[in-house]
Image (cartoon, rainbow, N blue to C red):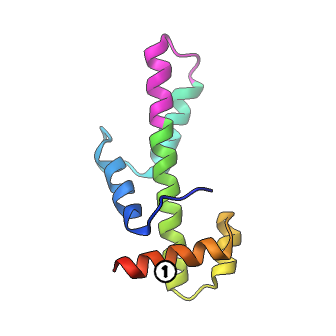
Amino acid sequence: MSAPATAPKLTPAVAAWADRQTTPGLGLTEALADLHQDWSAGPAANHDEHLRRLGAMNELADALRAATVHAALEAVEAGLPAKEVAATVGSTAATVTKWVKEARAAA
């Protein structure tokens, strides 16, 4: 799982994604379900629709990655071992430790 270069960009990445949505307050889970339903409704009618669907999926994937890293940071700050957090998010303890150091340095 790749992560943004620096921890301070994580929360704004999620906020920016949410700000661009047409439905205020739509959560990440609901957006994923909506996009899945849209995608599974059948083939896109034209090239623009294909590109719209792909763009929406890509934005959601970026926001989910950012939210996952943010949640990992919160878990470590709450006292969970970086190794355990890393195993849960499919990363390494060194990467999770790096995220924590970047977040603390930016604070």
Q: What secondary structure is the stretch in magenta mostly built from?
A: helix
State the count of labels.
1
Q: Residue, x 50% and y 53% (percent of image)?
A: 64
Tell me residue 58's x, y (percent). 50, 39
Dot 1: element: helix
Residue range in magenta is: 41-56
Residue 52 is a magenta residue: yes
Quadrant of the rendered image containing residue 56: top left
Looking at the picture, does residue 51 appear above or below residue 75?
A: above
Dot 1 crowding, Cα within 10 Å, few <14, some 14–19, many 20+: some
Q: Quadrant of the N terminus?
A: bottom right
Q: Residue, x 63% and y 80% (percent of image)?
A: 82
Residue 78 is a magenta residue: no
| Left or right of 67 in this view: 83 | right
Looking at the picture, does residue 63 appear above or below residue 56?
A: below
Quadrant of the rendered image containing residue 103: bottom left
Q: Residue, x 52% and y 16% (percent of image)?
A: 44
Amino acid bearing label 1: Lys
**Residue wearing tag 1:** 101
Tell me residue 11's x, y (percent). 37, 63
Looking at the picture, does residue 91 appear above or below residue 56?
A: below
